[in-house]
Image: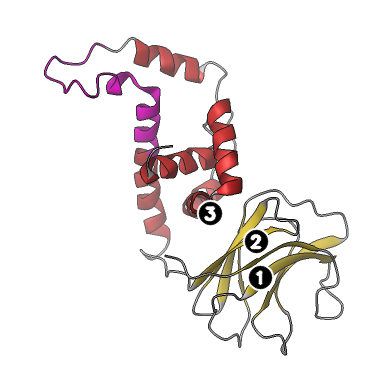
Amino acid sequence: MSTNEDRIVLAGEYVLGVLEAQEQREAQTLLAQDAAFRAAVADWRLRLEELDATASEVSPSPGLWRRIESAIAQAPPAAAEKPATRPGLWRSLTFWRAAALALAAACIVLVVGTLQPWGRPQPVVIAVLEAEDGSSPGAIVEAYADGSIRLVPLTDIPVPPGRALQVWTLWDQARGPVPLGLLDRARNAVLSVDGQPRPQPQQLYEITLEPASGSPTGRPTGPILYKGLAAVPR
């Protein structure tokens, strides 16, 4: 993956679910190792979530990609005056997939723009929540100046019957952990607690497994599934 733009395209295709097996493995490796790629995946998920919520699931026919590849392979040769440095561009499946992704993103921006005010405030801090052993990221937290946070899961988190995921933050050891919200499953969510100070770098965020009604003590009682420290986005 040679450029940042390539990685953004790969992140978008990963979220859309259009990658082939080798690219899917590459994306999963980057997701586990590259914080910038994880942020790009989270950003695509946020951009696409409104559209995803309104669309019913449709499975493409098994021969769809084969027909697309066949049509591209049969395209006429490039014109003679075309620069010699890019001879295969117009017959490149990667190029056409990237172009289609860009067009889809432009359409989504137009659709979403009619549903909500243009522009979204930037988070004050972002935290990547990782498993206790540091083996894999589980979610991203974006914390905003108004006290709200946006939780973006990066993986499925099993929730047994009668249990729930509870999100916490800790900005002061003397104050102790503060619950931010309760979720029945791993999903995109906006959570908010009144009276929080402005989010700060190194502020702790974590997800624990609690009873379905939440922690009975107001403090984490279940196992910590994912946790991470906040940092200022660049």
Q: Residue at x 53, y 15 (%)?
A: 63
From the viewer's side, name the closer residue of 41 and 159: 41
Residue occupying image coordinates x 57% and y 18%: 62
Q: CA distance from mark 3 to mark 2?
A: 11 Å
Q: Above or below — where is 180 with respect to 225?
A: below
x and y, in percent, of residue 186 in the image:
70, 55
* Residue 125 sits inside the magenta stretch: no
Residue type at mark 2: give it. Leu
- Kindly indicate whether the residue at mark 2 contacts the one at mark 1 (C-beta within 8 angstroms): yes
Q: Which residues are magenta?
A: 76-101
Residue 167 position (above or below residue 176): above
Residue 64's x, y, as percent?
50, 19
Q: Quadrant of the C terminus?
A: bottom left
User: Which of the 4 quarters of the picture holds residue 220?
Assistant: bottom right
Q: Is residue 81 above or below residue 26?
A: above
**Where residue 229 appears, x then y in whole percent?**
62, 69
The answer to whether any part of residue 56 appears in the image is no
In the picture of the structure, the residue carrying the numbered disc 2 is 129
Amino acid residing under circle 1: Tyr
Residue to which mark 3 is pinned: 35
* First in sequence: mark 3 vs mark 2: 3
User: How many residues crowd mark 2 within 10 Å: few (<14), some (14–19), many (20+)?
Assistant: many
Q: Residue at x 21, y 16 (%)?
A: 78
Drawn side of residue 4 relative to residue 220, left or right: left
Decide if residue 87 is in sight here: yes
How far apart marks 1 and 2 lie (CA) works out to 7 Å
